[in-house]
């Protein structure tokens, strides 16, 4: 069964500290992995996706097929990073996107 | 470039009623996906429409149905509303370039079923 698990509902770090948001998945095949972000009073938007291997706003995510994980990392958190983060996956036809329950990140000054 | 829009913003219905939610795609997009987001949960995939045909469906009963129009706007219809249908309904449009094409989300419609 396809599933995305984000084990932390809440995560709080201080400004300048490293941050890692965990994401584990189960999928029979090779999924495409995404991180979406929702800032306060804004709509859900794509942060990054595995296939493009980009670094967006200082965030990176590495796909570990052995551990079936796609953790999101940033070496130095900023207050403007405070938001709700969702990990998601889709199959090759991109018509079955599955989201995790989300992690609310708070970066304290 | 016009973003994804949804209407109405909020809606209150009673059990057993029917509801229609609307979504206008971003300019140039031919695919619309619909999601249900219950409080404290991530979005759950309902179905996707590509060029006016249903292209995939999640684990939702048949009383959830949809349409896509020639201009690629879309409707989500829910019949025989139940209390558990209370949620934020999101639509997302994409251009279906292939694997991993980016979905652009609308602001959502908040449905309350009393």
Image (cartoon, coloured by chain):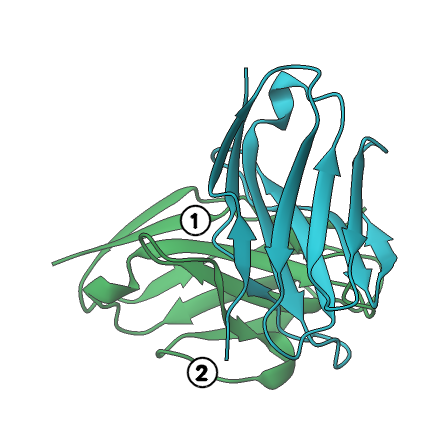
Chain colours: A green, B cyan
In terms of secondary structure, where does tag 2 sit?
loop
Chain at numbered mark 2: A
Seen in the picture, residue A7 relative to B102 is either above or below; the reply is above
The residue sitting at the front extreme is B70
Rendered residue at 63%/43% (across/down)? B21
* Image x and y of residue A89, in percent: 67, 61
Rendered residue at 44%/57% (across/down)? A43
Seen in the picture, residue B55 relative to B29 is either above or below; the reply is above
Q: Measure the alpha-carbon separation of dots 1 and 2.
A: 19 Å
- Which one is in front, A6 or B19? B19
Residue B70 in the figure: left or right of residue A104: right
Residue A100 in the figure: left or right of residue B95: left
- Which one is in front, A91 or A43? A43
* Image x and y of residue A33, in percent: 64, 67
Rendered residue at 58%/49% (across/down)? B90
The residue carrying mark 1 is A103
* Image x and y of residue B105, in percent: 54, 61
Q: Residues within 10 Å of mark 1 (few under 14, many from 20)?
A: many
- The answer to the question of whether label 1 and label 2 lie on touching residues, with beta carbons closer than 8 A, is no
Q: Is residue A54 visible?
A: yes
Q: Residue B37 appears in which quarter of the rendering?
A: top right
Seen in the picture, residue A59 relative to B54 is either above or below; the reply is below
- Which one is in front, A70 or B7? B7
The residue carrying mark 2 is A55
Same subunit, labels 1 and 2: the answer reads yes
Q: Is residue B59 visible?
A: no
The earlier-in-sequence mark between 1 and 2 is 2
Rendered residue at 62%/66% (across/down)? B25
State the mark number for residue B63.
none
């Amino acid at each position: 069964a396809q599933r995305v698990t984000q084990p932390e509902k809440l995560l709080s770090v201080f400004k300048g500290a490293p941050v890692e948001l965990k994401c584990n998945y189960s999928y029979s095949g090779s999924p495409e992995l995404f991180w979406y972000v929702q800032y306060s009073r804004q709509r859900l938007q794509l942060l990054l996706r595995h296939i493009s291997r980009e670094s967006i706003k200082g965030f990176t995510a590495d796909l570990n097929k052995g551990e079936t994980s796609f953790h999101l990392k940033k070496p130095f958190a900023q207050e403007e990073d405070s938001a709700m983060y969702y990990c998601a996956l889709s199959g090759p036809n991109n018509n079955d996107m599955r989201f995790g329950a989300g992690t609310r990140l708070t970066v304290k000054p | 470039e016009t973003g994804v829009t949804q209407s109405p913003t909020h809606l209150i219905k009673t059990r057993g009623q029917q509801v229609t939610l609307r979504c206008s795609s971003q300019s140039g997009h031919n695919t619309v996906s619909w999601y249900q987001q219950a409080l404290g949960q991530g979005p759950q995939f309902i179905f996707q429409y590509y060029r006016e045909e249903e292209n995939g469906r999640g684990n939702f009963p048949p009383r959830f149905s949809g349409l896509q129009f020639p201009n690629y706007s879309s409707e989500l219809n829910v019949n025989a509303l139940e209390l558990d249908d209370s949620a934020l309904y999101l639509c997302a449009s994409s251009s279906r370039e292939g694997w991993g094409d980016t979905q652009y989300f609308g602001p959502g419609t908040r449905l309350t079923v009393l």
